[in-house]
Amino acid sequence: QEADAELAVAEAEHRALLLDIEREVIEALAREEEAEHDLEVLDHGVLPAATQSVTAIRNSYEANRASFLALLDSARSLAEARLDRIDAQARRDAARADLARALGDDGGPPAREELK
């Protein structure tokens, strides 16, 4: 009877562990997907537009049709977009590391059995 109780406890702990792992995997995948989406938006929308804006305002400034303040503002916006991209990359990489950890990959060298 005591062995049955211990087995039931062990099975419950095992199920709880599996649920925790599943939750960690789902959360990591969601964070990775969100960061990938952010990178897509930045790479194909925000950064090209900000770069184009700096170029256009610089040309206007050189032709005395825009203020230096406008040029600084567009350069600041581009710098912020670049920082946003770095942040999105870091969030994606952290999510991937969390996913690997949840799946049991500690990032170390492969075990001898995996090399065979």
Image (tube, rainbow, N blue to C red):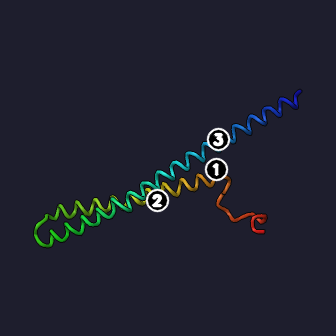
User: Which of pointers 1 and 2 lies earlier in the amino acid sequence?
Assistant: 2
Q: In this figure, which residue is indicated by the disc labeled 2?
A: 89
Q: Secondary structure at mark 2?
A: helix
Answer left or right for 36 relative to 62.
right
User: Which of pointers 1 and 3 lies earlier in the amino acid sequence?
Assistant: 3
Question: What's the residue type where badge 3 is placed?
Answer: Asp
Question: What's the residue type where badge 1 is placed?
Answer: Ala
Figure label count: 3
| Quadrant hosting residue 78 | bottom left
Q: In this figure, which residue is indicated by the disc labeled 1?
A: 102
User: Which of pointers 3 and 2 lies earlier in the amino acid sequence?
Assistant: 3
Q: Position of residue 51 (x, y in %)?
A: 29, 66
- Of the 4 image quadrants, the one containing the C terminus is bottom right
**Residue farthest top in this picture:** 1
Residue at point 69%, 65% (across, down)? 109
Q: Secondary structure at mark 1?
A: helix
- Above or below: residue 5 compared with residue 53: above
- Above or below: residue 87 compared with residue 2: below
Residue at point 52%, 48% (across, down)? 30
Question: What's the residue type where badge 2 is placed?
Answer: Gln
Q: Position of residue 70 (x, y in %)?
A: 18, 61
**Mark 1 in CB contact with mark 3 (< 8 angstroms):** no
**Mark 1 in CB contact with mark 2 (< 8 angstroms):** no
Q: Position of residue 60 (x, y in %)?
A: 15, 69
Picture disc at residue 20:
3
Q: Specify few, some or many for label 1: CA neighbours under 10 Å numbering under 14, 14-19, or 20 or more.
A: some
Residue at point 50%, 49% (across, down)? 31
Q: CA distance from mark 1 to mark 3?
A: 9 Å
Answer left or right for 77 relative to 63.
right
Q: CA distance from mark 1 to mark 2?
A: 20 Å
Residue at point 44%, 56% (across, down)? 88
